[in-house]
Image (tube, grey):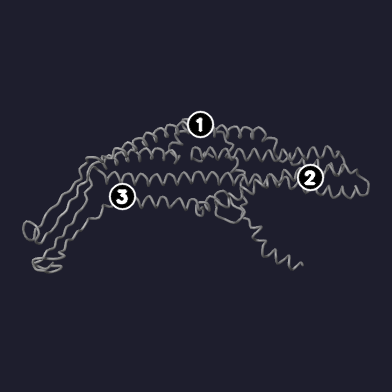
Amino acid sequence: MRKLCALLLVLFGPVVLAQKAVTLQDCESQFLKNNLFLLASQYNIDASKAMTIQARIWDNPSLTAELNAYNPERNQYFDIGKQGQKAFGIEQLIYLGGKKRNEIKLAQTNEKLAELQFNDLLRTLKLQLRKSFFTVYYNKKSLETTDNQLAHIEDLINSYSVQVQKGNIPLRDLVRLQSLYLNFKNERMEVVNENIEEQANLKLLLNSADNIVPEVSKEEFNKYIVTIPFDLKAFQDEALANRPDYLAKQMDIEANEINVKWQKALSVPDITVGANYDQRSGAFNREANLTLGIPLPLWNKNKGNIKYAKTILEQSKVEKQNFDLQLQTEIASAWNKWDESRKNYVVIKPTVNSDFEAVYNGILTNFQKRNISLLEFTDFMESYNQASIQVNELKKKVVLSGEELNSTINKDLF
């Protein structure tokens, strides 16, 4: 049986327990290399570049040939020799009105749009990565505190169970400890479930099967609690210069303006230039001609497409104006969330130090020596657990709100 258990541990242990301790920088480096969403989105840029190449290409020339099938005068089939008949022609479509120029400009603008959309996806996924990273880290800290208390309570439950059986301690004291233990277990399960979801996000973002164990230094956290004065104009200017989704709105207007010009150019008829050679059926033998052709713009002047392009242009301008107002609101909201979280943490920071841990150890020791009652001990344990978890929650909120502010402006303020 022991050999079987050992074999199972060897086979399945690494799969179940595989973990990887990484810093945020390590995570982001792996994310940029392995994220499948980014890799798939990169193809959109390549596809847009291909469309720019295609837009530069002119239509192929058209080659025609006319060969005699039957000559009734000579009663001869396929009479295409020196005394027979054959004709050849070649034609090339020449774009007028700036069609090709505007088509190329539109393709180039769409290429830039694809790059901006890629950068915006990168911004969104980067925020998700950082939020999951820090959530897992601070949840792990909360679990460590709760697990430490559970271990102490479990030892007390085992000791009290023996004493209850001997009749030295009333059963209600044991039940109270068990109730406290179950309460901690339930609270722990909520944190564990959240961490399972965040770990799944990290694995998906990093394209990795390993559980991520985040490492965050004290210095790395302290940068999020520095005081930053609120300057909406400066923040908005940064966002306007750095946010790819805002730049995409501007680029969208530019693309629609080019499209209007292109649609107008499409209403201008193109000219077809060509040359042909006719051996015998023209006005004289071995006739060489220059051909010109142009459609008459009598019915189709592309009015519908021009009107549609103008409508889409006006729509994109309104959407950009709405985005300007939305951006101001986002910046103010993100900054207020971060500043409020920072203030809440700074207020309680002086009380959260090694003395807090010393009080916990002192209470535990005094309870074991029966210097304090079970009721006092359990009340303190509940308060201490809640306080420890709340401190981690405050830290987590400071960091997460700081990262949201970074993402809103698309610049690392911390």
Q: Earlier in the sequence, mark 3 or mark 2?
A: 3
Q: Earlier in the sequence, mark 2 or mark 1?
A: 2
Question: Residue 391 is drawn in which quadrant?
Answer: top right
In what quadrant of the picture does the N terminus appear?
bottom right
Contact flag, marks 3 and 2 (Cβ < 8 Å): no
Q: Position of residue 47 (x, y in %)?
A: 39, 52
Label 3: few (<14), some (14–19) or many (≥20) C-alpha neighbours in 10 Å: some
Judging by the rendered image, the residue that carries numbered circle 3 is: 55
Q: Decide which of 110, 243 is in the foreground and name it.
A: 110
Q: Which kind of residue does numbered mark 2 sit on?
A: Tyr
Judging by the rendered image, the residue that carries numbered circle 1 is: 329
Question: Residue 174 is drawn in which quadrant?
Answer: top right
Label 2: few (<14), some (14–19) or many (≥20) C-alpha neighbours in 10 Å: some
Residue at 93% x, 49% y is 166
Q: Secondary structure at mark 2?
A: helix
Contact flag, marks 1 and 3 (Cβ < 8 Å): no
Q: Position of residue 71 (x, y in %)?
A: 11, 66
The image shows residue 236, relative to residue 43, as above or below, that is: above
Q: Which kind of residue does numbered mark 1 sit on?
A: Thr
Instruction: Find the distance from the CA under tag 2 to the CA under tag 1.
Output: 45 Å
In what quadrant of the picture does the C terminus appear?
top right
The image shows residue 293, relative to residue 230, as above or below, that is: below
Q: Which kind of residue does numbered mark 3 sit on?
A: Ala
**On the picture, is 409 further left or further right than 344?**
left
Mark 1 vs mark 3, foreground winner is 3
Contact flag, marks 2 and 1 (Cβ < 8 Å): no
Judging by the rendered image, the residue that carries numbered circle 2 is: 181
Q: Position of residue 267 (x, y in %)?
A: 25, 41
Q: Secondary structure at mark 3?
A: helix
Instruction: Find the distance from the CA under tag 3 to the CA under tag 2.
Output: 70 Å
Residue at 14% x, 52% y is 291
Label 1: few (<14), some (14–19) or many (≥20) C-alpha neighbours in 10 Å: few
